[in-house]
Structure formats: C-alpha cells, structure tokens
Image: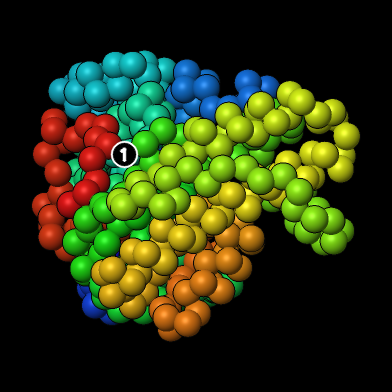
Amino acid sequence: MNILSIETSCDETAISIMKVSGGIKKPSFSILANNVSSQIDIHKEFGGVFPAVAKREHTKAIFPLTIKTLKEAKIYSENKKIIPLDKKVCKKIREICSHEQELAESLIEILPTIKKPKIDYIAITTGPGLEPALWVGINFAKAIALAFDIPLIPTNHMEGHVLSSLFKEKKVAKGFGVQTLNKVSFPALAVLISGGHTELVIMRDFLKYKKIGQTRDDAIGEAFDKVARILDIPYPGGPEISKLAKEHRKSGLNDEINFPRPMIHSQDFDFSFSGLKTAVLYYSQKVDKTKDEIKKAIARAFEDAATDVIVHKTYKAVVKYKITTVVVGGGVAANTHIKEKLTEKLKPLKTNILFPRKDLSTDNALMIGIAGYFQSLKNKKGANLNKVRANGNWSL
Ligand code: KG4
Ligand code: ZN
C-alpha cells in the first residue's frame, strides 16, 4: 500500500510517500519520494524556534511540497476536465483550515485540478510538538483526506523517532528498491534525545510502549542549544558544541572544568538539564568566553556531563529491565560522543544498539510513514476526521 506521510511538529515541513507491505513482523518498503523543507535559517535570527514563525512557514510550504512529492512519486496527474469541489466539501475545508485561510483557498482552487492519487493512507504527526506547527499539518492532512476520501492515521512523533533507528544504514534513499528494517529483539529500550524530549521508553513489542523516565525541565537538545547561545553560537547549537568539544579532546588538554551531573544517582529514570545549563552560565560569566580555547573547554565539559547522565541512566535501565536492544532516536542521537560512550558502556552487556543515520536523526517524514503504517494495521478505517487533534500523549 502507498502511504503519504506528513510531519510539521517543529521546524521542518517533511513529506514522503512510501510503498509498504509485509505487516508488523516483516515490514518492507520502497521510498517513492521524500522531501524535507527546513526552516532553520529563518529561526536562526530568533535564536530558537519561534512558534508563530514556524506556523507561517509550514503554511507556505506544505501544499507546494506535497505536490512536488506526488510528482516525484509519479502518482500525480491532472484532471482533464475540472469539476469544482462540492460546496459542502469547500465549507468543511474552510472550517478545518479556519486558522490557515490562505491554505484553505488554495486547496479549494487547486485540488479539483488534481486526480485522486494512488494513496491508501495519509499518516500525520499529531504530537508531541509545537501546537501551532502541528495544527498546520493536521488541518492540511484532514482537508486532503476529506477531499480525496483517503483514511487519515494520527501518528506519534516519538514513535517515529523510535522507528527511525530501524532504517538500514545508507539504503534510506529513493530508488533503492525494496528495503527492510533492522531487526529488534524485545524488550527494547528507546532512548529519545531531541530538542523537545529526553525520555526512556520500554518497548515490549511494536506499538507497546511504556515511558519510564523523562526530563523534569529542559530537554537535552534544548540544553545543547542554550549552552550554544551562552557561547554566542547560533541556533541549533548542538552540532557546533559537539565539534568544539571534539577539538578540545583532540588537543590533549585536560578536562579541567567539572560541571554537575544532575540526577545521575537518583533512584528513578528521570533527567534534569536546567541546573547543568545554569552551571555553564555561571562559569562562563567568570571567564573570557570569547576566547576559542575557553569556548572549547566549556563545550567539552558540558558535553561530558550531559553524556554521563544519559549513559548512566540508560545502562541502569538496560540492566533492570533485561533489555536486549537499545534504539536511540532524536536530533541528539547524531552526537558522536554520546554514540561512542553509550556503545562502549553497553558492550559488556552484549546489548544490541541502534542509532539512526544522520539525516534520519532529525525530523523527517519517513519515520512517520513507517509509524503510520504500523498504526494503520490496527486502525484500518483511519480516524474520524472530527476527532483528530494535536495530542502530546504517547505512553501507550
Ligand atoms: O529531533 P529534532 O530534530 O527536533 C525535535 O524533535 O526536538 O532535534 C533537534 C535537536 C536540537 O536541539 C539540536 O541542537 C540537536 O537536536 N542536535 C544535536 C546534534 N545534532 C542535532 N545535539 C548534540 N549533538 C549533535 N551532533
Ligand atoms: Zn523530533
């Protein structure tokens, strides 16, 4: 079956079309088209993701990007005879997209020119994420689901991040033919480390998740970004902090700064990164942070502290729950230091550990396509459009 998937939970408008089969036990897929339109350059000016700007940019990008994706997937064709949409459908589209009026009008004008594409399901990220950003994708997906009469599958962003580590190395591209996913043995542990989340989630099986820990304040990626801002590094600062930390380690200098490792010895699996960020702030006020060497030392000490906490808590959860596979997801999964330290620590336990490839660690629509496929297997008819809304819950 063909799945069109749409992701707008933060600052990427992402659309993909996959041909999927095999069920939950042996899923296989081919990528017909995959596009991401990033807003990072726009948000850079604000030093972070600004929800109203994210909403505006998603609203501009989503329909043209969908048409481009349909064309690339070769399932786009134009109607020879244009029959305007039924009046009731127009009214409903205007209602659904009442906060995106321009989008509603362009849908009403352009949809009658497009033949119903060969799509079996539309998978849409409904949360968690920035609400104004999520709603653009949700409303757009509802409108096209209604106009083309295609079932809509609400899909969880975090479940997407879990599944993104199952895509095999290198082969995640259009034109690679039929691909399969990495195998997972259960119980598995998902370590979700992104700009919005820091969570440990036990997976007894696909679609069976239980959150055992989460951050009580800042997410780890948010801490990376805030530390970057303290050091006058533009958003998103995670990759640059990591680069500076690496240079410091390479230079052979000692790790003379010792930042706190919040909650590292707490009995639970929760995290806290706000105190660590504050420690960086206080330290940087006492030194000349414009000096390259000092910047590097701070970046390294921060990354070491954040890494220690993630590695320690993951290890503890793996032992306690007799985990056989660890899957790491989210933007911070691209961090090479965390990758190395986590792999090293879990080695004696012989736990299988999977990381997403770099382009799939950040937000994308392929992960939503696979998550949507799994969900569609238990929800064949799709959701009642009137009931689809932004929804941050995900512990299932
Ligand atoms: O998953 P993602 O694209 O968006 C959310 O769902 O939050 O994650 C973005 C986050 C940003 O905070 C960014 O700074 C961080 O991932 N990030 C990194 C690295 N690459 C991206 N953090 C540390 N090291 C990296 N190499
Ligand atoms: Zn994400």
Identified at 79% across, 45% down, the residue is 296
Q: Position of residue 58 (x, y in %)?
A: 47, 30
Other residues around mark 1 within 10 Å, as few (<14) / some (14–19) / many (≥20): many
Q: Position of residue 106 (x, y in %)?
A: 41, 24
Q: Nearer the viewer, residue 205 or 73?
A: 205
Identified at 52% across, 22% down, the residue is 50
The kind of residue on which mark 1 rests is Gly
> Where 45 falls versus 387 (above or below)?
above
> Where 24 falls versus 241 (above or below)?
below
Q: Position of residue 205 (x, y in %)?
A: 22, 69
Residue under circle 1?
127
Identified at 81% across, 29% down, the residue is 287
Residue 378 appears in the rendering: yes
Res. 386 image quadrant: top left
Q: Which quadrant is home to the N terminus? A: bottom left
Q: Is residue 383 left or right of residue 147?
A: left
Q: Nearer the viewer, residue 185 or 113?
A: 185
Q: Nearer the viewer, residue 254 or 69?
A: 254
Residue 68 appears in the rendering: no
> Where 76 falls versus 373 (above or below)?
above
Q: Is residue 267 left or right of residue 36?
A: left
> Where 242 falls versus 204 (above or below)?
above
